[in-house]
Image: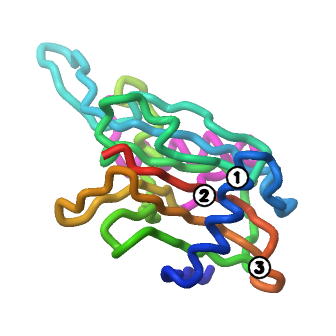
Amino acid sequence: MKQLIVGIGALAALATLGSTALAGDTPCAPEAKKFEWHMCIGAEVEYKRGMKTETRDECAVDKVIAKGTCELGDLASYVPEGTDIGRVQFYAIVPDGQKLDDYEIQYTYDGDNGCTIEPTSFNPWRTMKFSDAFDKDNSERSEMAVAKLKKKKLAFYPEAFVMRRFGGQECKGMKAAAGMLDKKTQSKYVFLMSAVFPM
């Protein structure tokens, strides 16, 4: 799957489509209907384990934000006020074996590259409660989460997306967008997400 970073010259085209997404006019590819998008807010969750208390990083909040559409809208609008955006990931559940070879991911952003939406690896174990498998390590817990979806003929999309600030960059009011669109016509979207940075 090719990933393409798009500079300011291409911002207008993707931003225009991004704004129409709010009106429900973005042309969605057929594959978009099979994506279920979640917001994961990570936190150190405490667990009583025998005589001691341990903390584990996991999705303290795991909420479905979009299903059956390519339009995710402004990611920042889903995040509760006061939440550290560095702790928030947006991930998708898709049909097992989903092929997306005919699509590419593009990105746009305001100004320099300090305030962006970026892909990051997603660890399936974060979707589980530590109490569901005290005796398993993170790798084993990821395998359990993947196997649970596979029984339903589903899988985790391999990347999650984050709103990222680099080097102390002041991002309040800055805009970024990311989208997966078809290589041939550059017009049909599997997903289109934007962000107006709250801080």
**Picture disc at residue 36:** none
Q: Is residue 198 left or right of residue 146?
A: left
Asked if residue 148 is positioned above or below residue 175 in the image, the reply reads above
Q: Is residue 194 visible?
A: yes
Residue with the mark numbered 2: 157
Is 39 or 13 nearer to us in this picture? Answer: 13
**Do the numbered discs 1 and 2 sit on residues whose CB atoms are within 8 Å?**
yes
Image-quadrant location for residue 115: bottom left
Is 154 within the magenta?
yes
- Amino acid type of the residue that numbered disc 3 sits on in the rendered structure: Gln
How packed is label 3: few (under 14 Cα within 10 Å), some, or many (20 or more)?
Answer: few
- Residue 147 x/y as whole percent: 60, 46
Q: Residue at x 46, y 64 (%)?
A: 119
Residue range highlighted in magenta: 134-158
- Amino acid type of the residue that numbered disc 1 sits on in the rendered structure: Val
Looking at the rendered image, the disc whose residue lies closer to the viewer, 3 or 2, is: 3
Is 140 or 8 nearer to us in this picture? Answer: 8
Residue with the mark numbered 3: 186
